Amino acid sequence: MSRPTDERVEAQVEARVGPDTLAAEEPLEIRVGGQALAVTMRTPGDDLDLAIGFLLTEGVIGRAADVVTAKLCAGDEEPNSYNVVDIRLGADVPAPVAQQAARNFYTTSSCGVCGKASIDAVRTRSTFDVSRDPLTVTPAVLAGLPGTLRRRQRAFDTTGGLHAAGLFTAGGELVCLREDIGRHNAVDKVVGWAVRQERLPLAEHILMVSGRAGFELCQKAWMAGIPLLAAVSAPSTLAVDIAAEAGLTLVGFLRGPTFNVYAAPHRVQGAPALPRR
């Protein structure tokens, strides 16, 4: 077989220069009682859910009643972008001063763990025991989740540059979907919505995410009491470790009719048991 000439290759290449619709990425400062706690790079929208979900998944709060007020505030920029959320906690909720001193809460849009002092520092123990959750799900339901998630990603259709997190029932019904340039932010937005709806723990629910399943997503699912995390791409070794520790079912490479189960396979009907380590 002859190799294509440079002219034939160049004829197949198309470059466009001009305006395009891009996903927004802006900083959001999260304050607790007027004191700066965290800055995350996110896609604007559902910012109160993002901030509350972040506090829940980081162990600062444990329920909706821990939050007295949550409001968007004026920042220091001109013109003002309102990229600040200030949350006032209940009098009986410890201020996160000690946690702030122990770890750096700055996060990027690509990774929710970057900048933390150490992995041990973010291994927050959840108040919910997901290992006892009775959820079971059929392979057919799991196989249908990516398609449902993708069809409901309105912002992705426009920009092609956003991650999504979807909360599903055991029967595959979509309960809540959020998009963000950062996958961990999308999860926090879903969790924050659930906190404000007073739905925690999210027992017998499934969290489906676009992209990979890293350690931080397993931690967030555990903190919210979600017993099954599914991702269209691969998990990390640390994600598998924490899922096994929590008793959280972890599914990866979920693409149509095929997927891998990395931890707690007993919740997937017909899945073989994992070999002992």
Image (spheres, grey):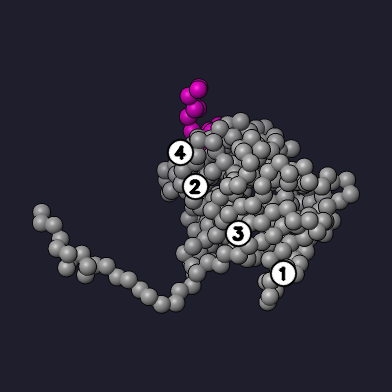
3 with respect to 64 (left or right): left
Q: Which residue is mark 2?
A: 212
Lower position in the chain sequence, tag 1 or tag 4? 1
Q: Are marks 1 and 4 in contact (CB under 8 Å)?
A: no
Which range of residues does the magenta coloring cover? 263-277
Amino acid on which disc 3 is placed: Met
Amino acid on which disc 1 is placed: Asp
Q: State the separation of the CA atoms marked 1 and 4.
A: 47 Å
Q: State the separation of the CA atoms marked 1 and 3.
A: 17 Å
Identify the secondary structure beneath mark 3: strand
Lower position in the chain sequence, tag 2 or tag 3? 3
Which mark is nearer the camera, 2 or 3? Answer: 3
Q: Which residue is mark 3?
A: 41
Please rate how many residues cluster around mark 3, counting C-alpha atoms within 10 Å: few if below 14, some from 14 to 19, many from 20. many
Q: Which residue is mark 4?
A: 260
Q: Residue at x 32, y 71 (%)?
A: 15
Q: Is residue 276 magenta?
A: yes
Q: Residue at x 54, y 36 (%)?
A: 238
Predominant secondary structure, magenta span: loop
Lower position in the chain sequence, tag 4 or tag 2? 2
Which mark is nearer the camera, 4 or 2? Answer: 2
Please rate how many residues cluster around mark 1, counting C-alpha atoms within 10 Å: few if below 14, some from 14 to 19, many from 20. few
Lower position in the chain sequence, tag 1 or tag 3? 3
Q: Which residue is mark 1?
A: 76
Q: Are marks 3 and 4 in contact (CB under 8 Å)?
A: no
